[in-house]
Amino acid sequence: MRLSGRVALVTGGSRGIGRAICEALADAGAAVAINYQGSERAAREVAREIAEAGGVADIFQADVSQREEVQRMKKQVLARFGRVDLLVNNAGITRDRTFVRMDEEAWAAVLSVNLNGVFYCTKAFLDGMLERRYGRIVHISSIVGQTGNYGQANYAAAKAALLGLTKTLAKELATKGITVNAVAPGFIETEMVAAVPEETRGKIVKQIPMGRLGTAQEVAKGVVFLLSDDASYITGQTLNVNGGMYV
Ligand code: NAP
């Protein structure tokens, strides 16, 4: 198995894309630390499913936008698994409205989780990767960070920032055995997209050359590739998983 012997942490692993990433990592042989914020039952369900399939997983509660909570999670994950080799910064939220209507709360909330959360989690686990001179980091960005999107100034800004962060970290860590890449999903069938009104979703699908939304599993396959040794010479890149919507 491609990832046997590796320990992975997936933020926001309780639902949607994060859940599919946890399952795909466990399938590939990694032990998986599943982070969640509020959906404990869902997180337990992911861990149970992985265990039933013969894998190893445990759940860890933390709001990634809170540095102290991330530090607490770090202690718990290290106590359980000893180290983190593979970090997937997946946790994300939306607070959509046009820029004219966007208040500071909506701006700050999205930047806190989608960008500061990545800062806190990467800070927390990078020192161990540096000590062992091995690590793989994947940031889950979005097509919206590449194209912008009506009503998503906060989200687009955070997701675009992740691409700059990816390239910079890749350069800083290239000689240390650590690769840093991003995955930019297009529109994927999860609860996040289910929250978009039906009519808007219909319009989005018309703009996708493949004529359908993607699945969380299709995103997860790209993530597993970037975390595997098959991607040993790939760093600072963005893998677009978007059905041809942005090329
Ligand atoms: P989702 O179904 O809404 O799930 C979001 C996940 O993030 C949940 O597991 C949630 O955990 C977790 N989360 C939210 N806030 C958190 C926090 N403060 N601390 C820790 N975990 C937190 O979303 P999704 O569609 O799977 O999206 C996953 C990632 O892909 C996000 O970064 C999103 O921006 C990105 N993305 C999604 C799409 C898409 O079309 N769906 C497209 C491009 C990019 P709890 O439920 O436990 O709170």
Image (tube, grey):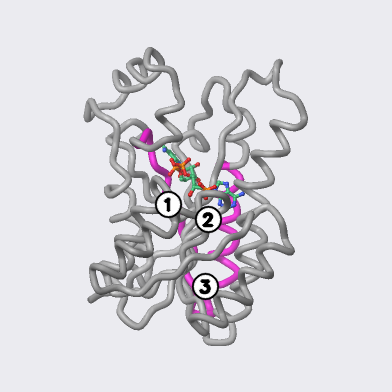
Q: Amino acid at mark 1?
A: Ala
User: In 3D space, how far apart are the residues under numbered discs 2 and 3 (Cα atoms)?
Assistant: 30 Å
Cβ at disc 2 under 8 Å from ligand 1: yes
**Helix, strand or loop at disc 1?**
helix
Task: Answer few, some or many: residues within 10 Å of disc 2's Cα (few below 14, many 20 plus, some between 14 and 19).
Answer: many
Where are the magenta residues, as a range? 159-188
Q: On residue 174, which mark appears? A: 3
Task: Give the residue number, with chain letter if any, for mark 2.
Answer: 36
Q: Which mark is residue 184?
A: none
Vertical relation: 200 (above or below) 179: above
Residue found at x 54% / y 20%? 150
Tally of numbered discs: 3
Quarter occupied by the N terminus: bottom left
Residue 176 % position (x, y): 54, 80
Q: Residue beneath label 1, please? A: 42
Residue 172 falls inside the magenta stretch: yes
Q: Which is nearer the N-term, disc 1 or disc 3? A: 1
Query: Magenta residues: mostly which secondary structure?
Result: helix
Q: Residue furthest right?
A: 104
Say if mark 1 contacts mark 2, CB within 8 Å. yes
The one of 9 and 164 positioned closer to us in this rendering: 9
Residue drawn at (48%, 65%), measured in percent from left and top?
Answer: 59
Residue 182, magenta (yes or no):
yes
Q: Amino acid at mark 2?
A: Tyr
